[in-house]
Image (spheres, grey):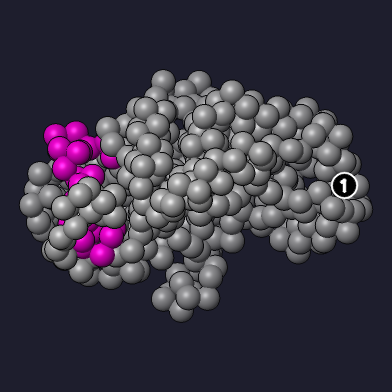
Amino acid sequence: MIPFSPPRIDQRIIDEVTDTLRSGWITTGPKTKRFEVELQKYTQCKRVLCLNSATAGLEIMLRWYGVGEGDEVILPAYTYSATANVIMHCGATPVFVDVNEDDFNISVQRIEAAITVNTKVIMPVDFGGLPCDYAAINALAEKHRGLFKVANNIQEQLGRILVLSDAAHSIGAWYQGKRAGALTDVSVISFHAVKNLTTAEGGAICLNLEGFDNDKIYQDLCVKTLHGQNKDALAKSVPGNWKYDIVEAGYKFNMTDILSSIGLVELSRYDAETLPVRKAICDQYQKGLQEYSWAKLPIFETTDKVSSYHLYPLRINQCTEMQRDEIITSISSLGVSVNVHFIPVPMMSFYKKLGFKIDDYPVTKSNYEVEISLPVFFDLNEADVKEVISAVVESVNKVLA
C-alpha cells in the first residue's frame, strides 16, 4: 500500500532526538529557543514563538487581540475545523465566506462583502501551501479602518482589523518576493505529522506587527502560553532564579525540546531537500495527468506566488460527489492511499446545528465534491508516482465510463 503522507524519520532525526533525551532537557529549553531563532531567520518575520500546535497559535493570537463575544472573524468555508473552532473557543462568531474556484483560497471580494463594524480579524488560509492574495487582503484591513470598533489598547494601537494568516500548509512558499510567515500581521504555521516540515506535533506564531514591539509581544505570549507563569523552566534553571509568579490564568501551549529536535533537522534541509522533492512529485503528477480531459490540475505557481507543494488537490471534471467517493474506494483497492481536503466546516454537524449551510458557499461545495488529494511525501519515488497515476486513471475511467 502506498501511504498518503508518512513523516520522514531518518538517522539524523533519531540522533538529534537521542541527543536531547540524553541531555536531560526534554521540555521547553535551549533547542526550542534555537528553533525559534532559525525559523525567524528562515521566514524573515520579526519574531517567532513555537507552541504545541498551530491551533494553539491561532487561539492565543485571537485572545491576545481581545477577540470575544460579539466579535466577528472572517474565514474561508473551505478549511479544516481548527480554523473555526478557535473562534468558537473565544466566544466570537465565525463568518464563513466562499473561495476562489481556481486555487481554493479565500475570495477577496467575499471578504469585503462580509466586513462589518463587528469584524475584528480576517483569517485567510493558504490552501495546500499556495499563499492567498495578501496585498489585496491587507489593503482591505487598511481600507476599513474607519469602520473598526476599538475595544482595548492593543486594538487601538493597531487601529484596524487584524490579518491573522492560517499558514499551516505554507512554510517555504513565496508571495511577491517574501516568504510565508512575513506576509501579514501574524501568521501561524503547523508542524503536524503530515506537514512538509514536521515536529510530530507543533506550530509556530510568526509575529510581523508594524508599530509594535514584537519582542515584548513574544515575552507576553510566553507567559500566556505557559500557565501565566513569568519564568519558564530554562529561566528558572539559572542558579538562584527559582522563584516565579503566576501573573494571569494562562494556557499550556509550549513546545518541547524533543519536538524542536525534529524541527531543527527538518528546517536545516528543507530548501535543499524537502521542497525540491515535493515539487518534483507534483510536476510528475502534472505531466502524467494533463492529457486527461477529466483532470483539473492544481495551481502551484503564478506571477507572484510559489506554493510549498503541501498538497496535490486533483479535481475530477463532470463528476458527482458520489462518483468521487467511488473513485476513492477504487483507488484504495488498488493499493494507493488518497485523501480529501477538506470536508468544508459548514458541512460538519456542530456547525450545521449553528445554522450554517454549505449551499451558501457554492464554490466551496463544488470544489469539495470533486477533489481528491494524491500522496506527496519525501520517500515517494518516481515508480510510486506512476503507480498512483495508473490507479487514478483506471479508477476514474471505470467510474465515469
Residue 48 in percent (x, y) is at: 32, 40
How many C-alpha atoms fall within 10 Å of the one at disc 1: few (<14), some, or many (≥20)? many
Bounds of the magenta span? Answer: 207-230
Residue position for label 1: 391
For residue 354, which quarter of the picture? bottom left
Left or right, 174 with respect to 317, comes to: left
Q: Nearer the viewer, residue 268 or 237?
A: 237
Residue appearing at x 55%, y 30% in the figure: 270
Tell which of 65 and 33 is nearer to you: 33
Residue 347 location in percent, x, y? 54, 68
Q: Nearer the viewer, residue 226 or 73?
A: 226
Q: Is residue 122 left or right of residue 294?
A: left
Spot occupied by residue 388 in the image (x, y as percentages of width and height): 83, 43
Residue 262 in view in this figure: no
Amino acid type at mark 1: Ala
In terms of depth relative to the viewer, which is nearer, 299 or 273? 273
Residue 307 at what x, y percent from top left?
A: 54, 32
State the residue lying farthest toward the front. 239
The total of numbered circles placed on residues is: 1
247 versus 353 height, above or below: above
Label 1, secondary structure: give it.
Answer: helix
Does any portion of residue 171 appear in the rendered image? yes
User: Going 66% across and 55% down the picture, which residue do you hit?
Assistant: 340
Q: Residue at x 41, y 41 (%)?
A: 31
